[in-house]
């Protein structure tokens, strides 16, 4: 569809989260006209990788989705078979 309509993928942006779900936009152009299309991030990333287009992520998304890997290590070291009964 994009090729037939002379539509160029400019970039994609992962620019929000709502209810723990990432939100994305596909930014395209045709001649001088530019527009954004709401998209699932997985679809947008797939298009960007296929077309070698830039992928942008806002600081707000990075901050809300990031974690300290040491926190995972600490959680794993405190859970074991003995802790299983307590969580059930």
Image (cartoon, helix red, strand yellow):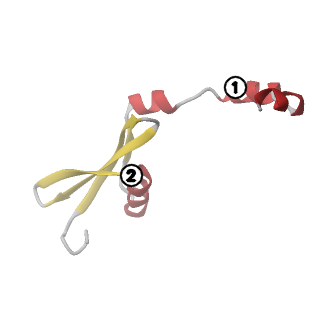
> Of all residues shown, which one is farthest toward the bottom?
4
The residue to which callout 2 is attached is 40
Image height of 22 relative to 38, above or below: above
Residue 80 at what x, y percent from top left?
85, 31
Residue 28 at what x, y percent from top left?
23, 56
Mark 1 Cα-neighbour bin, 10 Å: few <14, some 14–19, many ≥20: few
The residue to which callout 1 is attached is 70
Judge from the rendering whether residue 9 lies leftward or rightward of residue 48; answer left or right: left
Q: Residue at x 11, y 55 (%)?
A: 33
Asked if disc 2 and disc 1 are in contact, CB closer than 8 Å, the reply is no
Q: Quadrant of the C terminus?
A: top right
Q: Quadrant of the N terminus?
A: bottom left
How many marks are shown on the rendered structure? 2
Q: Residue at x 12, y 61 (%)?
A: 31
Image height of 43 relative to 20, above or below: below
Mark 2 Cα-neighbour bin, 10 Å: few <14, some 14–19, many ≥20: some
Judge from the rendering whether residue 4 lies leftward or rightward of residue 17; answer left or right: left
Q: Measure the C-alpha gap from mark 2 to mark 1.
A: 30 Å
Seen from the viewer's position, the closer of residues 58 and 86 is: 86
Residue 26 at what x, y percent from top left?
30, 52
> Of all residues shown, which one is farthest toward the right?
82
Pick whichever of labels 2 and 1 is earlier in the sequence: 2
What SS does tag 1 mark? helix
Judge from the rendering whether residue 41 lies leftward or rightward of residue 6; answer left or right: right
């Amino acid at each position: 569809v994009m090729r037939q309509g002379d539509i160029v993928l400019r970039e994609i942006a992962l620019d929000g989260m709502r209810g723990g779900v990432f939100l994305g936009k596909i930014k395209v152009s045709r001649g001088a006209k530019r527009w954004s299309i709401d998209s699932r991030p997985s679809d947008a990333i797939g298009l960007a990788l296929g077309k070698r287009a830039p992928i942008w992520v806002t600081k707000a998304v990075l901050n809300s989705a990031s974690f300290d890997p040491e926190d995972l290590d600490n959680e794993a070291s405190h859970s074991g078979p003995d802790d299983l009964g307590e969580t059930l």
